[in-house]
Image (cartoon, coloured by chain):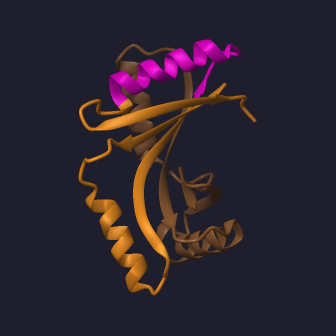
Chain colours: A brown, B orange
């Protein structure tokens, strides 16, 4: 199974990288962008055909390593491997 | 509209950050992970109610700034703002 772990900064946490992207888009003349957020996706290929088991492993990995619980939230989405 | 731009390394491009995550997960005793990929998500809040227009702006932004066409692929997914 593939487990995708989406990691985003919690609301209210300053996101200078997103601000830099927003400013750069404006400087390039790209109009109409009200807000920018920047996050990570970590895709884990897990040796199991059990979606629940895959989700459990991915959530454990996210808590232990992939997301910083102080300032980041994460979401896990499990899908079949291609 | 919200446009999510997913940016991933092209296949075959060396991904040391993913390798580091894989190794660290093993060191933490998290078993059963066959492969790791690491990418970015940039969420653009775009001032329009037209999904096609939002997608066009996001793809333009991705080509101009968000993705490095030499070594990265991108996918744009447009959804309604919450």
Q: Is residue B63 visible?
A: yes
Q: Is residue B59 magenta?
A: yes
Q: Which of B77 and A69 lies nearest the eye of the viewer? A: B77
Measured along the vertical axis of the image, is residue A32 above or below residue B68? above
Residue B71 image point, x, y percent: 26, 38
Identity of the residue drawn at 46% across and 87% down: B29
Left or right: where B13 falls relative to A18: left
Q: Which of B28 and A28 lies nearest the eye of the viewer? A: B28
Identity of the residue drawn at 39% across and 13% down: A29
Quarter of the image with the N terminus of chain A is bottom right
Identity of the residue drawn at 47% across and 58% down: A42
Measured along the vertical axis of the image, is residue B31 above or below residue A18? below
Identity of the residue drawn at 25% across and 47% down: B13
The magenta segment:
B45-65
Quarter location, residue B21: bottom left
Residue B44 image point, x, y percent: 55, 31
Left or right: where A16 falls relative to B11: right
Measured along the vertical axis of the image, is residue A10 above or below residue A58? above
Q: Which of B56 and A2 lies nearest the eye of the viewer? A: A2
């Amino acid at each position: 199974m593939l487990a995708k772990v989406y990691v985003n900064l919690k609301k209210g946490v300053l996101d200078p990288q997103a601000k830099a992207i927003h400013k750069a888009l404006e400087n390039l003349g790209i109009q109409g962008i009200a807000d920018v957020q920047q996050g990570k996706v970590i895709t884990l290929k897990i040796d199991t055909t059990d979606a629940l088991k895959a989700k459990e492993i991915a959530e454990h990995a996210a808590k232990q390593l992939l997301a910083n619980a102080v300032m980041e939230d994460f979401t896990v989405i499990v899908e079949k491997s291609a």
